[in-house]
Image: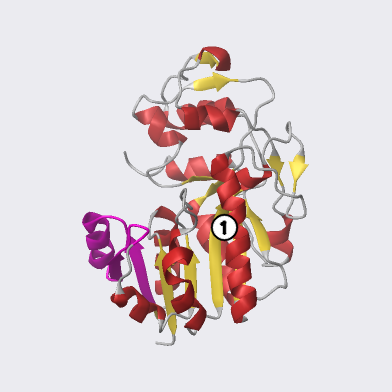
Amino acid sequence: MNNHLFCFGFGYTAGHLARRLASSGDWQISGTATTPAGRDQILADGYSGYLFAGDDYDPLIEAALATATHIVMSAPPGDQGDPALSVYAAPMGNSPAEWIGYLSTVGVYGDRQGDWVDEDTAPKPGSARTARRVAAEQQWLALGQSTSKRAEIFRLSGIYGPGRSAIDSVRDGSARRVIKPGQVFNRIHVEDIAATLAAAVDRATGHAIFNVTDDEPAPPQDVISYAAGLVGLPVPPDVAYEHATMSPMGRSFYEENRRVRNDRIKSALGVQLRFPTYREGLSALAQIPP
């Protein structure tokens, strides 16, 4: 077994990538969780699991990094910066890793009033949260450059998939059709993220940044209506954005409006999206029993 993937933040997305790579039979998988329960789940899945809450050094993690051929960082930066870089930059730099993937967000583009953006569009973060993302992107790219490793940034749009979709919110009664005229969101099925990352592992393109999103930015209320129709439940009533009750985080998403292009993952990585729009994705998820 020559390939060893180490994931900082072994959560929903990293788990799908791990299963995709492990299915080929020649991958060792390791990852971190912030809680003992999360670490135990990694172990139960047949991988090597470690605890990392963001500021604690563990010699076992350093030992795992010493054999890592591929590294993924999927945890967000905190107020003190990127947690993995603050503790394990040197072990990662000294590792045999040939590829480092940093999972960022399309939120770094900020509000574009519905206009299209691509990887050549300069970031314009609209919050401290996304400004930290931009800083972390640059730090990961700098680590790659200083250690001659291939480091790549993957800007993900809204992630959905089994257990995390409009199908689930319609079924559990939490779905709402919040109406803000002209608003669209970008989204991506978790299986298409995993496929994109797997393609990047296998193919050096000369590009450092990739938008990972589907083909059709869409109004959120349309997605809810489509999901309700698929599972035969009533379409939730409309709620005007001005009157909607939501968390500060949720409201911040509605304060930004952009359409994100995905041409580069297709042309450079050869990705063919299994779920090019929310319709294909939700239709597949509707077949999963509740």
**Residue 270, x across and y down, in percent:** 67, 66
The local crowd at label 1, few if under 14, some if 14 to 19, many if 20 or more residues have their Cα within 10 Å, is many
Which image quarter holds the C terminus? top left
Position of 209 with respect to 78 (left or right) is right
Please state which amino acid type lies under the numbered disc 1: Ala
Q: Say whether residue 266 is magenta.
A: no
**Residue 64, x across and y down, in percent:** 35, 78
Q: Residue at x 62, y 81 (%)?
A: 148
Colour scheme employed for the rendering of this structure = secondary structure
Which image quarter holds the N terminus? bottom left
Q: Is residue 3 above or below residue 182?
A: below
**Residue 246, x across and y down, in percent:** 46, 23
* 275 and 213: which is toward the camera: 213
Q: Which residues are magenta?
A: 28-55
Residue 23 in sight here: no
- Report the residue that reaches farthest toward the bottom: 2
Q: Which residue is mark 1?
A: 136
Q: Residue at x 76, y 50 (%)?
A: 121
- Report the residue that reaches farthest toward the front: 80
Q: Secondary structure at mark 1?
A: helix
Q: Residue at x 45, y 47 (%)?
A: 161
Q: Is residue 191 above or below residue 205?
A: above
Q: Say whether residue 41 is magenta.
A: yes
* 286 and 73: which is toward the camera: 73
**Residue 266, x across and y down, in percent:** 70, 61
Occupied quadrant, residue 168: top left
Total count of labels:
1
Position of 34 with respect to 201 (left or right) is left
Residue 259 in sight here: yes
Q: Is residue 238 above or below residue 134?
A: above
